[in-house]
Image (cartoon, grey):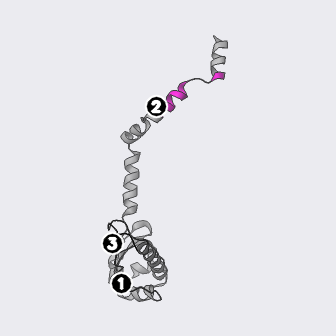
Amino acid sequence: MSKPRDGKQPSQRQLRVGELLRQRLSEELRRFDFEPKILKRAVLTVTQVAVSPDLRKATAFIMPLGGDNAEAIVALLNDDVARLKKPVLSGLHLKYVPDFVFRVDESFDRAAHMDALLAENAVQRDIDDTPDNRLDNKLDDKPTAAESDTAHEDG
C-alpha cells in the first residue's frame, strides 16, 4: 500500500519515467531530422523532464548551447511534438502516452543570478562577519608559541 502524497514532491515513478523520457528525448533530438535550419544547427540539452502525477503530461526543459534563440527553438520544438512523440515513446510500456510540452530551462539564469547576489560586497561582508569567522579571526591574530618566544628574545 502506498503512502498518501501531498502533491508537492514527485513520486519515485514520476522521477523514473521523467528520467527515462529525458534520456530518450536527448537521443532522439540528436538524430532527428528537423526542417528549420535553426534546429538543425542547434546543440540542445534536455535538462529535465517533469511528469505529472497521472503520467499523462510531460514538460521537457530545453536549453540550447549558449542560450541563443532559446524561445524560437522551443516554439519550433513544440510545433514538431507530434513527430517527436512516436520515436521517443516507442517501446515504452506506459498506460498512457504523455503529451509533451517544451519549455526553456531558466534554472541556469536563476543560478547565475544567485551567484551574482552572493558575490555582492554586502553579502560577502555579512558572510565574513559570522560568529565562526570572528572566532577564527581572533585565533589567527594570536601569535603562536614560537612567534611569542621570538618576540621575547628580540625585546
Residue at 40% from the left image edge and 56% from the top image edge: 112
Q: Position of residue 145 (x, y in %)?
A: 64, 22
User: Hey, what amino acid is under mark 3?
Assistant: Glu
Q: Secondary structure at mark 2?
A: helix
Quarter assignment of residue 3: bottom left
Does residue 108 appear to the left or right of 136 in the view shown? left
The residue beneath circle 2 is 134
Whether the residues at callouts 3 and 1 have beta carbons within 8 Å, the answer is no
Q: CA distance from mark 2 to mark 3?
A: 47 Å
- Say which of marks 2 and 1 sits in front: 2
Q: CA distance from mark 3 to mark 1?
A: 15 Å
The residue beneath circle 1 is 81
- Say which of marks 2 and 3 sits in front: 2
Task: Tell me if mark 1 has few (under 14), some (14-19) or many (20+) residues whose alpha carbon lies within 10 angstroms of its own.
Answer: some
For the record, the magenta segment spans 133-145
Q: How many marks?
A: 3
Q: Secondary structure at mark 3?
A: helix
Q: Earlier in the sequence, mark 3 or mark 1?
A: 3
The residue beneath circle 3 is 71
Q: Earlier in the sequence, mark 2 or mark 3?
A: 3
Q: Residue furthest top?
A: 155
